[in-house]
Amino acid sequence: MPLPVPAIVVPAYNRPACLQRLLQGIAAANYPHQETLPVPLVISIDHSPHNEQVIAIAQGFEWRFGPKEVILQQQHLGLKQHILTCGQLTRQYGSIILLEDDLQVSPWYYHYAQRAIEFYEPCEQIAGISLYHYEIAENGFYPFIPLDDGSDVYFMQVASSWGQAWTARHWQYFEHWLNQNPVFDQQNNLYPNYLRQWSEHSWKKYFIAYLIHSGRYFVFPRLSLTTNSGEPGTNSITKGLFQVPLQQAQRAYRFVTLNSATAVYDASFELLPQSLSRLASFIENYDYTVDLYGTKTPQQITTPFVLTTRPVNRAALYFGQEMVPNVLNIICNTKGVAIKMAATTDVVYSEMPEFTRYYRLAAVAEKIFAPLHNYPKISVVLPFMPQDTAENLLQTIQSLAVQHYPNLEVNIVAPGKAGIGMPFSAQVQAMLQNIPDVHYFTCPENAADITDLLQTGIQNSSGTIINYTPKIGIIYQSYVLHMAAQIFSGFGQVNWITGTGAHQPEITDNSSSLPQYRWNKTRFASVSLLQAMQLLLPEHMFWRKFLWNDTGQCFPPAFPHLPHLGLLGKFWEREPLFTVFRPITAGAAASATLPTDVALQVQQEFSRLQQQLQKPQTGWAASAFGLLAKPFFLADVPYLRYLYISLQQFPPVIRYHAPTNSYYLSQY
């Protein structure tokens, strides 16, 4: 027996221009059998003391395709309860097409909805029909492209809220579940994180929870019949992000049953493993979860293996990430290391920024994803000496990899014969796969001096920003690569920065000037060797490579026992050193202990270096004021410390503003 003609239901509230646009769109659409099968239109208006214009538009709208009813709700329901109330109209009409007032429709939206309802009504696992097609996933805001399986539809455990159709059976099943589960369980690990972040005003989070619990799916079209305009509203904040092309010509739709479909997705917008294994039989013996966008938590992955883009300690299989949609990289077995089939216990979990979850994100929306040119290439040079261990290297590499910096180069340099690779452990090799650009360099075994290794690594760095450490095993703080990118991209006058001490807590006090971490040539020329070696560590510094290029492209040979401080002396002749009041590294660091047999030579080198950097003597008045003001500077006395800072011409410090995740220059 054929189903009744679906009624069109439009919930409206306080957006008269949106309602007017939607009604004009549905009036211009095509309706099959419009002469013999009238199409009911229901406009339900939520109560508000200021919606007279909305009521006038609804009541004055001429609907020539069937009966029209305007329902004025007697009390304010709110978005969630209003949609639930409209869903109950399925009992009266047998099936409905629900269109919120901020939508625009294709001329053929009704054709698609009616045919999809007729085809999928017998299927118990279908819980609704979407008229909207996703191009941007709501789980992480990455591009979404459903896998082609020859049909005009795909299936997801995601409810559609931008144009959907329900039958009385669909709504009855959901309503029964909702009565049994009236409170959303925020602690349920089955739910994706994005679902738990949605407001309680969202009916959709409950419907998705119902889909997950009941094992049911929504049917989605591959070419959208509706589009979201992103007008301001209860659950809309980003205008235009979810706008998609609309179908403009009539089509003969190719529907496919759920059991025979390949394009079947879970609530995280990930293809189901059974679908993927049909097309990539070489992975069918793995019991795995698909997490190619890196959004699933450890609690959501209950299988022994996971197919992921997250860092892993080791992997059974590796794939590239050059093809779209991303599952094609597995189906076509592309070469690369971006996607891994790994044991669940080998995945390295860390908070992953949304713009790194998928490599095409930069083109999605500038409001959400900064353009890639804001991420200058950063090169980190790591020497690997014979006495170093793979465990120490793993510790340092992992601290860099988990930052997910998209333009990172790591240069590892070791003594040895040219052309021979470095036999690192499987764990180190697996972690290195998570860094975008890794290079290995060797120096002749007889040139095993740490300076030679570092010089080779720096000379071969292609980044515009450089960092190096004379000893591996340090742990880079989780924010430092993005911090360096923000600072060097935002402040053109900053070419060289140092952070605070490795073992200091993160500094959030914006009233202290922490004088021990502020440097200029005058201060350097007056401190002890021990202070300089303890506080001016290379692993705390980032600098633009042009400093290296413009000052000889080498460590200065005049200071063989103090290569790092000698290099800083050359930098100081060119640029000031800015201090950023955040730690850069923690953990193991280069030893400040001086070998007894060269201590005198080292001290002599340091004295020569200090003499080179001494400023010409200032007048007696400035010197006297400086002596008087210095105690206030050392004691961090507000305002009074500024006198010494000005006299000594300290550069501004760089402070961090946590609420906006940004950096700013401060004279204090």
Image: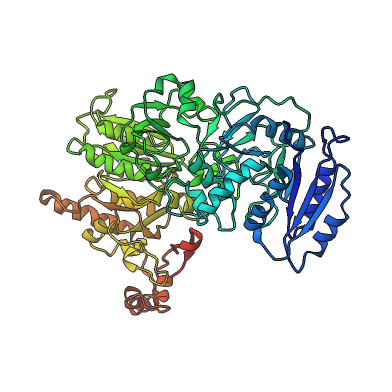
Q: Is residue 381 left or right of residue 175?
A: left
Residue 505 image offset from top left, x and y in percent: 32, 62
Residue 480 image offset from top left, x and y in percent: 39, 51
Q: Nearer the viewer, residue 164 or 362?
A: 164
Q: Is residue 374 visible?
A: no
- Residue lying at the far front of the rendered structure: 1
Give me the residue at 31% from left, 38% from top.
345
Position of residue 584 relative to residue 402, above or below, is: below
Position of residue 479 relative to residue 388, above or below, is: below
Give me the residue at 33% from left, 27% from top.
316
Give me the residue at 86% from left, 42% from top.
65
Residue 103 image offset from top left, x and y in percent: 73, 47
Q: Quadrant of residue 77?
A: bottom right
The quarter of the rendered structure image containing the N terminus is top right
Give me the residue at 32% from left, 76% from top.
635
Residue 145 image offset from top left, x and y in percent: 58, 33
Q: Is residue 389 visible?
A: yes
Q: Nearer the viewer, residue 543 or 657?
A: 657
Q: Is residue 644 left or right of residue 52?
A: left
- Residue lying at the far left of the rendered structure: 597
Position of residue 530 relative to residue 588, above or below, is: below
The quarter of the rendered structure image containing the C terminus is bottom left
Q: Quadrant of residue 218?
A: top right
